[in-house]
Image (cartoon, coloured by chain):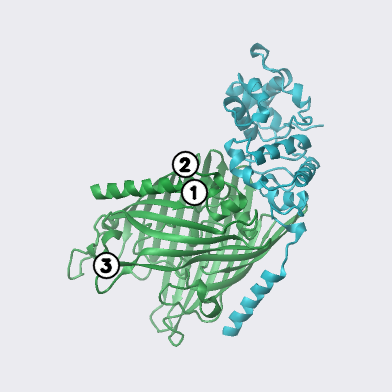
Chain colours: A green, B cyan
Amino acid sequence: MKRNLTSLLSALAAMSVLLLPGSAEAVPAFARQTGQNCVACHAGGQFPELTPYGRMFKLTGYTIGERTLPLSMMGVLTANKVKVADPAQGATQNGDLVFNTGSLFVAGKITDNIGGFAQITYNNYDGPNPDTGSFYGHTGSDNLDIRYADRLIDTNRDFIYGLTLNNNPGVQDVFHSVPAWGPATVPGSTGPGNGLTPILDNALGAQAAGIGAYAYWDKTVYAEVTGYKTGDGVFSFMTQGNGGQAYLKGTNPYVRVALTKEWGPHNAMVGLTHFDVHQYEADPSSPTDRYRDTGIDAQYQYLLDPYTLTATVARIHEGIDYGSGVPSATINSLRAKTSFTYQAKYGATLSYFNMTNNQMQESSGWTPEVFWTPVQYVRLGLQYTLFNKNEGVTDPRDPTGASILDAKSSNTLFFYVWGAY
Amino acid sequence: MNNVSITLALILAAIGTGCQTTPERSRNLNDPSVSGKTLAQQVCSNCHGIDGNSVNPNFPNLAEQQKDYFVDEIKEFKSHDRFDPAGFEYMWGLSRSLTEKQVGELAAYFAAQKNIPDKSADPKREAEGKLVFDQGVPAKNIPPCMACHGPEAAGNGTFPRLAGQHADYIMKQLTVFQRTDERPQGAVMKNVAHDLTPDNIANVAAFLSTLSKK
């Protein structure tokens, strides 16, 4: 405990030296580009929830502002304390404060119509070495979204259209009900435990290459069609360093429609997503599994200084037909999150998850969180995930691996320090 | 499949190299060749509305705003003299590279729009606000707002238009004037607003938000 406290204090001291002074323009590349504070684009300065202006910044291809040094860094320190920890998982479950991930962003406008961001992440706890059991670090490509966008606007019309090249179905979305930006986006967050999640829930993150076209009409109707294929060949830079390549058969359609409305300090969205994927079980000579995901989601925001509130809910239904002849599977995911900030400094969130399926691997629970953003580049948060259900988790204390733990044994306390510059 | 990849990559490359700046639709805040009108439509409209009437009261309405006041404020943001949080968080960066010509064009664009006042929601409060606006608070030596902002609150030169401004915005700015020195150009308002009670402020803001210049 003392060691934890010492390392925490040293880490905080180091970060404060790095991050304390500076003007509002001194942080991540997009803020430098517009010269604005994080709160302009992120609701209450929290990451990643976007404000309506932040959504327009993204939809217009990250091109508002002026070209500056397009580099940013992000680092996350975490401590996870699982109620019944697996000793083999070491520092990822025993409560030690560890350096979890570090990212480099190349982000900004390229021309007046083209901009984007590409994230490269070093994961300090990528996986345990099968021989030694100790964890090793690994660097790989992370989220990427490069856009071309144009906007036809005058007092009679407002029409934004564009193209996106990205590597994670949903990462191009501007709402936070989609899994790519939804609950548990802080690296190391507990998430839905052992429950099965649909392929739309980041399963192809940095594993596929997508090119899509989108349009946003009169701040009312958003529509997008993107095709995803294997991220190899000329697209391999988007999936570099992420271990086994996911192989998709042909081009797989992702279709998104959303309706949006703003009134006073309120704004709301209701949307539909459909993703139809043919994925080889291993390499392209292996059988093909077909995933059909259909999602409905909604978001509500209240933004009036000094308060912000963002509430999201998403339900995804997935049917899987296995090429190998294994009986079909059905996976349902329900996730909801409400976050509140005050003065862009103090915040709280409450997330709910309920993963149901016919695979005996269901989970459900709640994650309350409080966080503090002392300066806009640093956030400290404390989460506790309470599991009502977490099927199929074996007891690490049983050498035979036959005993199954009750759900509450997976309850997890999670602390993080997130910084970006 | 490789052919598909190569074709897609070529399309993107063609877009990247072929699409030069379109000054009529640019969002570049550091390009003097982009007109103020274009920046108003492509950038400012995101928060202040395409016609200068913002949806969210965090952001002031700019429609029919006095040009001299508008230019003064942009200059104050640009020089960092105005440093109320809501101002510097959003406006320091956006204004940093604008030319005088662009600022003038922005002022003209928004001055030419039609202000849409908020609907009346609390007639009693608005009536009490009208008293403060027309007569001030004589007992506290608070002068009437109309003395500088005009009988219809349309403003005059460097005195801003207040008619049809969001109540929330007026309340927050009066509080900034009253409690801070974050808007030095509006220092005169510190004396004027000093003894206004929270109720006075809410009343006059409610009245102004519904006021339409005839």
- Check chain identity for marks 3 and 2: say if they share one: yes
Q: Read off the residue under disc 3.
A: A134
Image marks 1 and 2: residues in contact by CB distance under 8 Å: no
Q: Chain of mark 1?
A: A
Residue in the foreground of this view, choosing between B16 and A251: B16
Q: What kind of residue is marked 1? A: Gln
Instruction: Please report whichever mark, 1 or 2, sits nearer to the chain's N-terminal start.
Output: 1
Instruction: Please report whichever mark, 3 or 2, sits nearer to the chain's N-terminal start.
Output: 3
The answer to whether residue A204 is left or right of residue B71 is left
Q: Chain of mark 2?
A: A
Q: Read off the residue under disc 1.
A: A46
Q: Is residue B122 visible?
A: no
Q: Quadrant of the C terminus of chain B?
A: top right
Instruction: Determine the residue located farthest toward the bottom in the rendered image.
Output: A285
The answer to whether residue A28 is left or right of residue A98 is right
Calculate the distance from the C-alpha at mark 3 to the C-alpha at mark 2: 37 Å
Q: What kind of residue is marked 2? A: Lys
Image marks 1 and 3: residues in contact by CB distance under 8 Å: no
x, y (%) of residue A247?
A: 47, 79
Circle number at residue A345:
2
The answer to whether residue A80 is left or right of residue B33 is left
Circle number at residue A183:
none
x, y (%) of residue B10?
A: 65, 77
